[in-house]
Amino acid sequence: MAPIPFATIGTSWITASFITSAHSTSQWQLRAIYSRKAETAKHFAAKHTAYTEENNANIAIHDSLDALAKDKDVQVVYIASPNSLHFAHAKQMLEAGKHVVVEKPAANNLKELDQLFKVAKENNVFLLEAFRHLHEKNFIALKSSLPKIGKILGANLSYCQYSSKIGALEKGEKPNVFDLNFGGGCLVDLGVYCVSAAVELLGAPERVEYHPTKVSTGADGAGVLLLHYHPKDSEAFTVTITASKLFNSSSPSEVFGSTGTLSIPTITDIEKVTYWDAKSKEKESFGGEREHLNLREEALEFARIIGKKDQEAVRSKEEVSRAVIEVTESARRGAGLLFKGES
């Protein structure tokens, strides 16, 4: 199969990482880069590809979204613009008949997300939300090992990483990542990794409650999210999610069951999975070597889905995306964290 021709929107480190990871699979080929300023796109292309002003490296430079939407050499658009722009950017590219891979969160709320899925179906293309960690081989090993721990009794999931923007906050500035008008906040930036992991492993919860630690901008800098489950054939249990951009933590993420516990050291870039037998107290670690190009597994799976037109996989990922945004939107609204235009 010929490599999938793709374009990018956004010029941050994660866009560069996706380009590198995608190219490493030999199943993708970058054909265009968009930025509001052509010089920014050219600089990014020169830094992360073979592009030069002289040879252009078969990469088109766009400073117009309309031009990108009309670019017939592009089949897929990878979107990593600021959160608040994901919806508009994705909608325009889907309407142009292009598949879209969009960084989490794909939209600000469920209404927007459902509209994107509707537009995708109307144009016979796919909208794929990039929860990269769900494609890691060791996350898949964790999920496949759930039967080892018997009846689920609960879980603690954690993602706490001190933000490089704290200094700006302390100076009275309002970085996008802490600005509700830009779809910012810890829950939708870091906490969503834990939420999507919980949904992928355990399904959608019945009820959620969020206890945020707010920063000077009014956004959540950290918080504890409770996901309450009550399966029909089992006892109720709770998943506790701790997320923070205000401090670091080395706490592992664990799923507890009646016959044992499954543990991973981090929620992303998982080095190993450990099973701890409840009765014998013995521990067993397993899983493959971690992929150091941390978007490569995701790029491989998305290339497979698009190439094979795997509608069942798309449907499954749509269910996860909808369940995740239902959790984060409900949690935000319950804690009074409203994005621009919400009431």
Image (cartoon, helix red, strand yellow):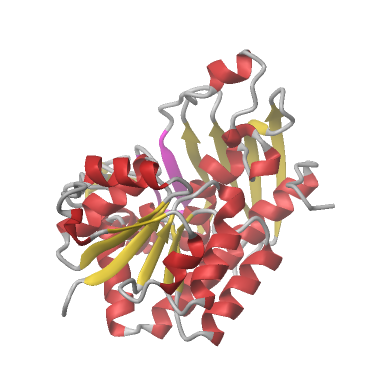
State left or right for residue 143 relative to residue 343. Answer: left
State left or right for residue 234 relative to residue 265. Answer: right
* Residue in view at x 62 percent, y 67 percent: 113
Quadrant that contains the N terminus:
bottom left
Query: Dominant secondary structure of the magenta stretch?
Result: strand
Q: Residue reaching furthest top?
A: 171
**Where, by quadrant of the figure, is residue 68 drawn?**
bottom left
For the residue pair 195 and 298, the one nearer the viewer reads as 298
**Where, by quadrant of the figure, is residue 326 drawn?**
bottom right
* Residue in view at x 34 percent, y 62 percent: 7
* Residue in view at x 33 percent, y 77 percent: 306
**Where, by quadrant of the figure, is residue 285 drawn?**
top left
Residue 254 in percent (x, y) is at: 44, 43
| Residue 247 visible from this viewpoint | yes
State left or right for residue 147 relative to residue 184. Answer: left
* Residue in view at x 65 percent, y 52 percent: 328
Q: Is residue 47 above or below residue 258?
A: above
For the residue pair 56 and 195, the one nearer the viewer reads as 56
For the residue pair 171 and 300, the one nearer the viewer reads as 171
| Residue 275 visible from this viewpoint | no
Q: Residue reaching furthest front?
A: 54
Q: Is residue 17 above or below residue 97?
A: above
Residue 256 in percent (x, y) is at: 47, 48
Residue 122 in percent (x, y) is at: 56, 86
Q: Is residue 103 magenta?
A: no
Q: Is residue 328 above or below residue 161?
A: below
Q: Magenta stretch: give its range.
A: 252-264
Residue 121 in percent (x, y) is at: 53, 84
Q: Is residue 254 magenta?
A: yes
